[in-house]
Image (cartoon, rainbow, N blue to C red):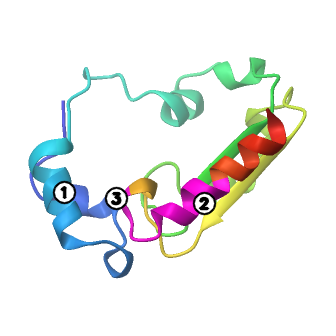
Amino acid sequence: MTTEPGTRIIWYYGWNADEAVFNLDEARLKDAMPSGDSGGFVDEVFIGPPRSLEIDVPVLAVLGDRDLSNCAPRRARRPTSFYPKSPHFRVEVRKKVAHALNLHRDARETIDLIRRWLDQHS
C-alpha cells in the first residue's frame, strides 16, 4: 500500500517546504509498505502491548507542530507513559514543520538538534 497521488502534501507545511522537493517525493521517493504494517506509534497506540514499554535507553521524539498524522504533538502530551523505563525522555516540537521533518526547508536545524542530543546521550 502507498499514498494516493497528491495526498502526501499533508506531510508538509507549505510555508516551509519547497514545491520541487514535494514533487520529487511524490514522483520518485515514496515507497510501499505491506497493508497492515503501519509500524511504530500507530501499532503502539491501537494494537499493543507497546514494544516501547521495554525501551530502557534515552529517547528523543522530534515532532512537527503542523503534523496532521498520528505522530502529531497533541499525542505527545502523555509520552512518558510510552517509555517508562527510559532514563531520559525528551520531546522536541519543531515549529512550522509537518510529518516529513527532513524534507522541510529548515531540515538542517532538525538534524543538528538530533545530532546534539545524540552527542549528549551516546
The residue where tag 1 is placed is 7
Residue 102 vs residue 86, the one in the foreground: 102
Q: Position of residue 38 (x, y in %)?
A: 39, 29
The residue at 34%/65% (across/down) is: 12
Q: Position of residue 82 (x, y in %)?
A: 73, 34
In the drawing, what numbered circle is on residue 11? Answer: 3
Answer whether residue 110 is magenta in the image: yes
Magenta segment, prevailing SS (helix, strand or loop): helix
The secondary element bearing badge 1 is classed as: helix
Vertical comparison of 22 with 116: above or below: below
Give the mark nearer the N terminus: 2 vs 3.
3
Q: Residues within 10 Å of mark 3 (few under 14, many from 20)?
A: many
Quadrant where the C terminus sits is top right
Q: Amino acid at mark 1?
A: Thr
Judge depth for marks 2 and 3 and give the one in front: 3
What is the C-alpha distance between the residues marked 2 and 3?
Answer: 14 Å
- Using the rendered view, name the quadrant where residue 95 is placed: bottom right
The secondary element bearing badge 2 is classed as: helix
Q: Residue furthest right?
A: 87
Residues rendered magenta in the picture: 103-113
- Using the rendered view, name the quadrant where residue 109 is placed: bottom right
Quadrant where the N terminus sits is top left
What is the C-alpha distance between the residues marked 3 and 1?
Answer: 8 Å
Q: Amino acid at mark 2?
A: Pro
Answer whether residue 32 is magenta in the image: no
Q: Is residue 10 left or right of residue 110?
A: left
Give the mark nearer the N terminus: 1 vs 2.
1
Query: Is there CB contact under 8 Å for labels 1 and 2?
Result: no
Q: Amino acid at mark 3?
A: Trp
Q: Is residue 6 left or right of residue 33?
A: left
Residue 64 in view? no
The residue where tag 2 is placed is 73
